Image: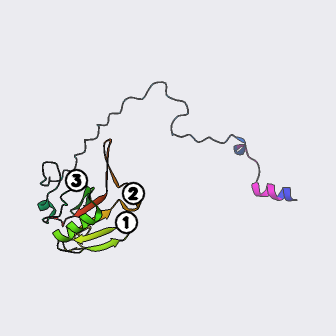
Amino acid sequence: MAALVGAALLGPVSAQQTQPVPVPRPFPGPSNPPSAPPPPATTPAPAPQTPVVRPALPTQQSGAPTDQMLGAPGVIFPQSEYLESFDLDRGQRVYLFGTNSGYAEVLAYYKQALKDGGRELFKSPAMQQFDIGKYQEQTMAYPPSVVVKDYSFGNFEGYLHVVGRAQTRYKTIVQIVPAPSR
């Protein structure tokens, strides 16, 4: 009886069901490859994209930003080296400087130069922030500030900065975010 019910559900066997199932192909088109290669494409090559060019900012001979460019006198620690900068959006950039001066020495410099005690962000590894402008949430991506971080904490060898094959380590990193110029 069960065989009859199964056969009734499947219905009568037709000639269509006995033919082989078609095999899907990765590409549509004829089943036989063409005997000659297709003609070359006649569509024109895409126009080269024009790179976005941002206006150059005034810099020192070494390519490092100046205190005036960063908007505050004494904002660059004297024994630091300019490493690189990144776009933060909304017309702001962050500038990274590295130094092998100790964290306490760099902190003391900024407390005196900026006439501000700053605020401690983390105890370990030590990280302190000094505000150098008013943060405007509607127009800024990040508060204008100087952040000092200790990269020699806990026997760490320091911040690794790589340019090409040259590797340099820095005990202390200074991150400067100036207010956007408008």
Q: Residues within 10 Å of mark 2 (few under 14, many from 20)?
A: few
Query: Can you say which quadrant of the picture contains the N terminus?
Result: bottom right
Callout 3: SS? strand
Mark 2 or 3, closer to the camera:
2
Q: Residues within 10 Å of mark 3 (few under 14, many from 20)?
A: some
**Which segment did they paint magenta?**
5-15
Q: Say whether disc 3 or disc 1 marks the residue closer to the N-terminus.
A: 3
* Relative side of 40 to 51, left or right: right
Q: Position of residue 116 (x, y in %)?
A: 20, 74
**Residue 153, percent across and down?**
37, 62
Callout 1: helix, strand or loop?
loop
**Among the two numbered marks 1 and 2 on one chain, the one whose residue lies closer to the N terminus:** 1
Secondary structure category for the residue under label 2: loop
Q: Residue at x 12, y 65 (%)?
A: 73
The label shown at residue 156 is 2
CA distance separating discs 1 and 2: 10 Å
Q: Which residue is mark 3?
A: 81
- The single residue placed furthest to the right in the displayed view is 1
* Residue occupying image coordinates x 19% and y 50%: 53
Q: Which residue is mark 1?
A: 125
